[in-house]
Image: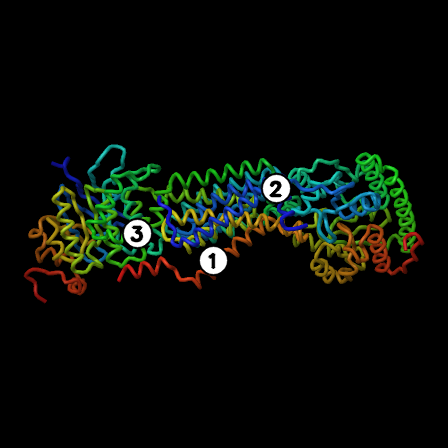
Amino acid sequence: MTSQRLLNLDDVSFAYEGDAALTHVNMHIDPGQAVAIIGPNGAGKSTMLKGVLGVIPLVAGEMTVFRPKKGRGQSGRIGYLPQDDDIDSEFPITLRQVVMMGRYRRLGWFRFPGADDKQAVADALQVTGLTSRANVRFGTLSGGQQQRGLLARALATKPSLLLLDEPFNALDQPNRDALIDTLNDLKRRGVGILLTTHDLELAREVCDSILLVNGTQVAFGSLDEVLTLENLQEAFQGVQVEVDEHQVVIPGHSH
Amino acid sequence: MSFIEILSQAFTLPFMWRAAALLAGLTLAAGLIGVFVNLRGLEFLSDGLTHAVFPGVAAGFMVAGTGGVLWGAILAAAAATVFLTLLSHRKVTSDAAIAIMLTAMFSIGVIIVSKSHNVASSLEQLLFGHLFTVTTTEVIITLIVCAIAFALVLATLRGQVFAAFDARGAQASGYRPLGLSLVLNIAIACVVVAASIAVGNLLVLAVIIVPGAISRMWTRGLGGLFVGAIIFAVVAATIGLLASFTVSVGANVAIPGGASIAIVFVLGYLLSLAVRAIVPDRSQQLAKRGEQ
Amino acid sequence: MRIQCANKTVCVAVVVVAVVGTVAVLSGCSSPAPKPTGLHVVATTTQVTDFTTQIVGSAGTVTGIITANQSAHSFDPSAKVLLEMSQADALVINSLGIEPWLSSAIDASGFHGTVINATNGISVVDQDPHVWTSITNAQMMVKNIAIGLAKVDPAQANVFAENAAGYEAQLDSLKTWATADIDQIPASRRLLVTNHDALAYFVKEFGITFVGSIIPSFDDNAEPSAAEIDQLVAKIKASGAKAVFSESTISPKLAQTIAAEAGVAVYSGEDALYADTLGPDGSNGQTYIDATIHNVRVLVTAWGGTNLPLPKDLS
C-alpha cells in the first residue's frame, strides 16, 4: 500500500556536488512508525535526512514523500530537527518566535499568525516543557533547552513526518524520558518518525525499524532482523572504538 | 545668526527638502536591510557591492553625464549581485570571491576615470555623493529604488528571518536559500545605489551597517531589532543633515552632507559601544536569573 | 511580529529624540528666512568674484562661491553657498564648462535671479575656459558684468559703469606694464611648462612658447600616464626650458618629479603661478591684478630678467 506510506525510497542515492554520500537505500515509513538510522560517524545518517528534505539532491532511484495538500509544497508538513551546531546562538530572537517559525510555511508570506498558529506554538512548548521559557532569548537557553526548542518548532509544524537529527544528544535523563514519551505519543497519532542516533537503547524504545548504513545501506527491517552481529560488523567495520564509546550494544558479541 | 534662526532657514530651501525626502526613503530601507546585513554577517558582501557599483557609476557618467550615474550604478549593482550570490552559493569561499571582485571592479572604475578627463572632475562627487545638489529626478528614482528594496525584504521577511537564524532549517521547511539570498542581495544593492547618490560610494557602508549593529546591541526580540534600526537610521540622518547645514551656514565650514551623516552614524555606533560597555545587558541578566 | 524592547528606557529615549527632531524640523518650515536688504550678487570663480566686487563697490554685497586655491572644476556646493544663491539677485558665472556643478546648484538652491555670463562674446580657443588669463579678455568680462548688473539694478547702473571704467583703466596699465616687462626677454627664451593647460590665453597674449603641461587637460583633476610623463620630460630637455611652474591649486609633487628628471628648476609654493584661482586674502595674489603681477614677475625672474617698476595706479 505505497499510496498510504509517508515515505518510500526505492534504490535511492543522494550525492552532494558529485560525491555520492549515501547509496542504494530501500526503505519506507508508514504512519505511526518510527525508523532509526544507525551507523558510524560519516556513514551518511544526516545525509539521509537532508536527502529526504530535498536539501541534498537525489541522484538515483525513486523517492516518494507524502504530499499533504496541493500547492503547499511537499515539505510543508515535514518537521525537521537540525543538529544544534547549525544554529546562530547569538541571534536576537525569543524561543516563542523560533517555535513560530514552524508555522511560517503555513502562514505564507503575509498572513499574520492566527489563533490556531498560536495554539500550535503553545502546544509544542507545552509538550517540550518549555512554556515558562517562551519569552527568553533563544541564545540564552541551555543546550538541552535549545534542542527541545527546535523540537518544539518541528512539532509546531503539526507534521505528518518528523525528521530528527540526533534528538537525544545534549539531553539529560529526565529530558530523554520526556522526549521518548513525546515521540511515542506522536506515533499513536499517526506521525511517522525518522531519526538518527548513536544510542541503540533509545532506538529500541521508540523505533519499529532500523536503517543500518555505512555510506550505503547495510540493512533495513525490524530491530531483530537488522541488529545481527553480521550486519553490525559490516556497518561498523574498523570503527569498533567509536562503537564502544557510544555504548552500542552488539548482541552476542564479546571483545 | 542663532542656531534656531539657522535651522528655521534650512527648510525654506528646495535642496534641504530634496535631501530630506531622499534620506527618508534611504534610511527606512537601510534600517530594515541593515538588520539582515548584521544578522547574516553580510558586511563584507555589502562592501563588495559598493566597490562594484563604482565602475558602473563612472561608466554611466561617461556615457550619459550626470543623468547616467544612477543607471550605471543600477546596472553594475544588478550584475554584481547576481554574480556574488551565485558565487557565494558555490563551494568557493565567498570572502575570497568578494575580495577578488572588489579589487577587480574598483580598478576598472579607476581605469575608466583616468581615461576620461570629464569624469575626473566628478570623481569626488561619485565618491562622496552630492546630497545638497540632487535633482528632483534623482530623488524620485532613489525613492523608487529604496521602495523596491524595502518591498523585496518585507515581502520575504519570514523566509529571510528563518534563513538568517537557521539556513538549513529554512531550506528544510521549504524555503529556497538561493532565491532568498538573491532577493536580499538585490535589496542591499538597491540601498547601495541609493546611498551612493546621497552620501557617496565611500560612505555607503556606514549607512548600511551601523543601524543594524547598534540595534543589535540594545534589543532582544526581532520586532525591536527592526524598529530600533530604522529609528536610529532616521534620527541619525536627520541630525547629520541638520548638523551639516548648521555648521556650513553658521560657522562657514563646508561639510558635505553625506560625510556629515556618515560621521553621525559612526559616532552613534561608538557611543553605543561605550554605553554598552558601561551598562550591563539587562536581558542577559534576566535570562540567567530565570535559569536558576 | 511583536515589538519587544530589551530596555524600556532606551526605547523611550529613542522615541523622544525622534519626536523632538520631527517637531524641530516641522517648526522650521513655518518661519521663512529673512532676505538681506540691498543688491546681493553671487559670483562663481574667484576672478569673476573680484571683477564683480570692483564693479559693485559699495552699491551692494558680493559673495564668491569658489574660495581661493580651490579648484572650480570639482566643487561640491556647501549648504551655505546654496543658501547664498537662494537669496541672490544675480549670479555671475564664467561658464564655458568650468562650473559643471552649476546647473544642479541653481536647481537645488531655487535661485530665481538673473544669471550674468561674464564670458559672453569672448572667442574661445580649443574649448579652453581659462579665458581671463588674457587681460584683454578680462576687460571684456568686466564690461559684460557691468552691463548685466545694470539690467538687474537699473537704478545703480551709473555707479556700475563708473566703477567698471575705472577698473578697466587699471587693467590697461597692467597690460602695458606686463607687456613691457616680458618684452625684456627674447621671445625664444620665453618657455613655459605648467601643471595643466590653464594659461593658454596668457601665453598667446604675451608671445610665450608653451612647451607642455604635466596634466594634458584643462581639468586639474586628471592624471597623466607614464608615457605622457616621459614625453614631457623629453620635450622639456629638447626645448631648453629652464623651469617648471607649478600652480597654486595643485600639489607640486608631480611637477617636482618631472623637473628633477628633466634637470630643471621648479617654481612652487610661494612662487607658484595663479591660474585656476586667485590667492587668499593677504597673499600676493588676492586680486586679479595682484595675481597677474605676481605671475609676470615670477616668470620674468625665472627667465633671467629684472622686473620693471609698477606704474603708479597699480602700486
On the image, the x and y values in percent for residue B228 come to 44, 49
Q: Nearer the viewer, residue C212 or B257?
A: B257
Classify residue A103 as left or right of residue B217: left
Chain of the residue under the numbered disc 3 shown in the image: A
Quadrant of residue C98 in the image? top right
Classify residue C49 as left or right of residue A146: right
Q: Residues within 10 Å of mark 2 (few under 14, many from 20)?
A: many
Whether tag 2 and tag 3 are in contact, CB under 8 A, the answer is: no
Identify which residue is drawn at 45% across, 40% down.
B150
Under mark 3, the amino acid is Asn
Q: Secondary structure at mark 3?
A: loop
Alpha-carbon span between mark 1 and mark 3: 25 Å
Under mark 2, the amino acid is Phe
Q: Which disc number belongs to residue C145?
A: none
Query: Up-down: is A62 above or below B277?
Result: above
> What residue sits right under mark 3 in the picture?
A135
Under mark 1, the amino acid is Ser
Q: Are marks 1 and 3 on the same chain?
A: no
> What residue sits right under mark 1 in the picture?
B272
Q: Nearer the viewer, residue B115 or C248?
A: C248
Quadrant of residue A104 in the image? top left
Q: Examine the rendering and report whether any part of residue C126 can be seen.
A: no
> What residue sits right under mark 2 in the picture?
B11
Q: Are marks 2 and 3 on the same chain?
A: no
Q: Secondary structure at mark 1?
A: helix
Classify residue C119 as left or right of residue C77: right
Query: Please, which colouring scheme is shown?
Result: rainbow
Q: Nearer the viewer, residue A241 or C3?
A: C3
